[in-house]
Amino acid sequence: MRIDIVTIFPAFFDVLDVSLIGKARERGTLDLRVHDLRDAAHDRHHTVDDTPYGGGAGMVMKPEPWGETLDGILGEDAVLIVPSPAGERFTQAVARELADEQQLVFACGRYEGIDQRVVDHYEARGRVRLMSLGDYVLNGGEVAAMAMIEAVTRLIPGVVGNPASLVEESHEDGLLEYPIYTKPKEWRGLEVPPVLLSGHHGEIARWRREQSLERTRVRRPDLLA
Ligand code: ADE
């Protein structure tokens, strides 16, 4: 998969050199490139923002640097992803859809956002998805893009070492994951649930299912509705 990120803060993405994503890049499973939007701002100060038409607080990102940068990056089959609190909700199901794509391009806005014509222009020419991580506001799209990139890339075959570890997780079956334990059997007076030491695989599976359902009922009843 190829992933391109456009940002005025490329340093945010330095950490993508480490961990499983870093290894996937080294192996060539993942071709990840970070682009500085200011490279396409040609005035002396590399200006990327201006005041909003119609008035109001804050600044708006100018369309021209976005157009020049995205024109040079977007391939035929690319999906342009614009992190935004005004977008559709990013979920595990969306992550699975995106993991099948050839190229994802993340356009990370700052300030009050990007001039609407950028989205309108690329929507008329290809696939664009405004994606929100949740009902809260971040300072820009960078942290949201990072979260989405991690959620998507770990689903690409070969990125996570043991594919079985992807199956039994929160949200994969629509429920929250059951609690997990390791050695020692007792820690600070707290014991591992005896069923997990019983060796009865059927009973363990049943207990885990019940725990998943109960956790989901208490913490996220919206998932059961
Ligand atoms: N940019 C700012 N807030 C955001 C959010 N909640 N999700 C995605 N992108 C954002």
Image (cartoon, grey):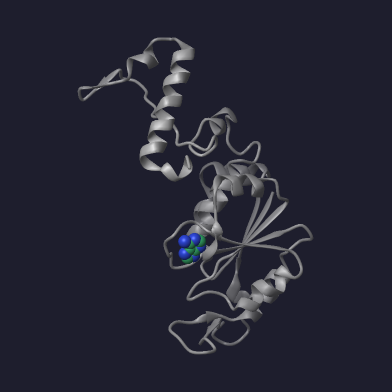
Picture coordinates of residue 112, whole percent (x, y) = 48, 76
Picture coordinates of residue 2, whole percent (x, y) = 69, 53
Residue at the right extreme, as displayed: 76
Depth check: give the residue in front, 4 or 122. 122
**Count of residue discs:** 0
- Place residue 10 in its image quadrant: bottom right
In the figure, 124 relative to 88: above or below?
below
Residue at the left extreme, as displayed: 189
Residue at the front extreme, as displayed: 225
Q: Residue at x 33, y 19 (%)?
A: 193
- Place residue 135 in its image quadrant: bottom left
Depth check: give the residue in front, 56 or 166. 56
Residue 128 visible from this viewpoint: yes
Residue at the top extreme, as displayed: 199
In the figure, 15 relative to 136: above or below?
above
Picture coordinates of residue 41, whole percent (x, y) = 61, 81
Q: Residue at x 59, y 81 (%)?
A: 62
Residue 142 visible from this viewpoint: no
Depth check: give the residue in front, 133 or 158. 133
Q: Residue at x 51, y 67 (%)?
A: 9
In the figure, 64 relative to 148: above or below?
below
Q: Residue at x 65, y 75 (%)?
A: 118
Picture coordinates of residue 8, whole percent (x, y) = 54, 71
